[in-house]
Amino acid sequence: MSAEFHPVAGQFRRRRRRISKGARYLVTALIVYLGLAASGKAAAQDFLHTNKGVPATPASPLLREHTCIFGPLGQPLRLQEAVERALCNNPKTREAWANVEIQAAAVGAARAAYLPTLSTSVQEVRDRTSTVIGGYPQLTSRDDMNTASGSASLSWVLYDFGGRNAAIKNASQLLAAAQASHEGSLQDAFADVSKHYYAAQAAQGTLTTAIENERTANESLQVAKRRADSGVSPISDALQAETAYVQAVVSRTKAEGDLQAAIGAMAVDMGLRPDEPVVLPEVEEGGMPDDDFQESVSSLIDGAMQQHPSVRAAWAEFKAAEAKVAQTRAAGLPSFGLAAKLSRNTQPASLGLGLPPYPATVRDGYFGVQVSVPIFEGFVRDYQIRQAKAQMNLQGEVLYEARQQAALDVWTNYQLVQSTTQNITNSAKLLEIALESYTAAQRRYMVGVGSVVELLSTQSSLATARQQRVQALTDWRSSRLQLAAKLGRLGMPRIAGQ
């Protein structure tokens, strides 16, 4: 019966043409998307808005407006520039930054589970068929034909008992952990380059002190030689003074090597070669004690146990493990969704053996509800849930350990700041007394009242006092920044005035 006398069949054919037209639109859209993907533009798009959690540069959390582009080294190199270079160029900070990008992409993948999935396939075939039947040449046939087929499938999970939501929580918490770890790596890089900067400055101060001590020892040697040459004092005085002078030369030579080693360690922190020429400011040009850390040590410990990046990272990983338990449990429950498929092929149809095939078009499509119910998985789900719970318990212990370590670090560095602050005043007083003592002993020896032993003793005390003064200044500056790092409070304002 023809279609003209069958309205229902005619309606079906019109509906079929509308579906085919929609399929053509769908295929066109997919081709456009695949073209963008081939050019790399689709991959650059953040359709699910996950890149908001990725810093613009490896140093952005601490250097928000910095582009991480540098010119020649400052002359002299200030601590702020050293820190900026280290934050941008340290491999550890860049690794942590890359991990944030990875976890942000994982959040996008988890969010994408709420969207439908669509797949399509297209096939074009050149078909040659030859049929030879013995004794019946009239049934022998040979046909050449082109056939095409295409299909599009759609699936969309609508409800899965919280599995996808738990996956998003897990990925989001892992992203938060990565962000905290990135901030922690910046704090560590900040603290390391500051420590090496002050170590290099201390080495430079030690070299300056060694040069001063060598000059002082030479003055004492010349006085002893004049007195020995004139017969006022024995030759042993001159020999003792010469021994002290040579020891001062040895100390100065060692100080030169220590300075170059310290500068090399600092240069590597900044992403430079260890043989990069670096000029540092004098020790006395740095900051002096202030009232930055007047809080009680108890409140500082409380803050660190809650806000230090390592603690926040451990807390986020614990929450991620908690969400993983829910995700694993939900994966063993039923899920409900939609399923649809539309296909079309032009495979020729034959009415019988030996008859030529006729052009034909076959269309097929379905749309319905899909229910997936896991019935038995060989107990694997039970063990996966058990594993996820054990991982959560492990992360709980890691969190406890991170908090304890943060408390101990704050306590230790707080005490160090207190002692180094007091030693700033003590070392200044010691240097003043040692200088006066040496001056008095030198006068006494020159007029013949004092002995060379007294002179050399006060000379040695003066050299020690000079070194202790340099060490006290650099130790205090380093310890206050180390404490700030253990508190998770390091930032560029801390060093802006240094």
Image: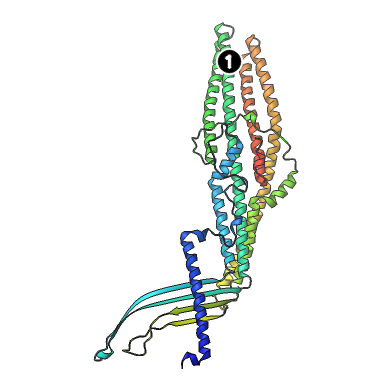
Question: What percent of the width, then of the height, locates residue 444?
Answer: 66, 12
Report the front residue among 36 and 236: 36
Q: Is residue 301 above or below residue 109?
A: above
Q: Is residue 406 above or below residue 278?
A: below
Q: Residue at x 51, y 30 (%)?
A: 257
Reading the image, the residue beneath label 1 is 219
Secondary structure under badge 1? helix
Crowd band around label 1 with a 10 angstrom C-alpha radius: few (<14), some (14–19), many (20+): some
- Looking at the image, which residue sits at the far front? 4
Question: What percent of the width, then of the height, locates residue 272?
Answer: 51, 39
Q: Is residue 149 above or below residue 431?
A: below
- Looking at the image, which residue sits at the far top? 230
Is residue 298 something that shows in the picture?
yes
Q: Residue at x 61, y 42 (%)?
A: 191
Q: How is the image coloured?
A: rainbow
Residue 258 horizontal side relative to residue 130, left or right: right
| Tag 1: amino acid | Glu
Residue 363 horizontal side relative to residue 284, left or right: left
Q: How many marks?
A: 1
Question: What percent of the width, then of the height, locates residue 236?
Answer: 55, 13
Q: Residue at x 53, y 28 (%)?
A: 256
Q: Is residue 27 above or below residue 72?
A: below
Question: What percent of the width, then of the height, locates residue 170?
Answer: 61, 63
Image quadrant in which the C terminus is located: top right
Is residue 324 something that shows in the picture?
no
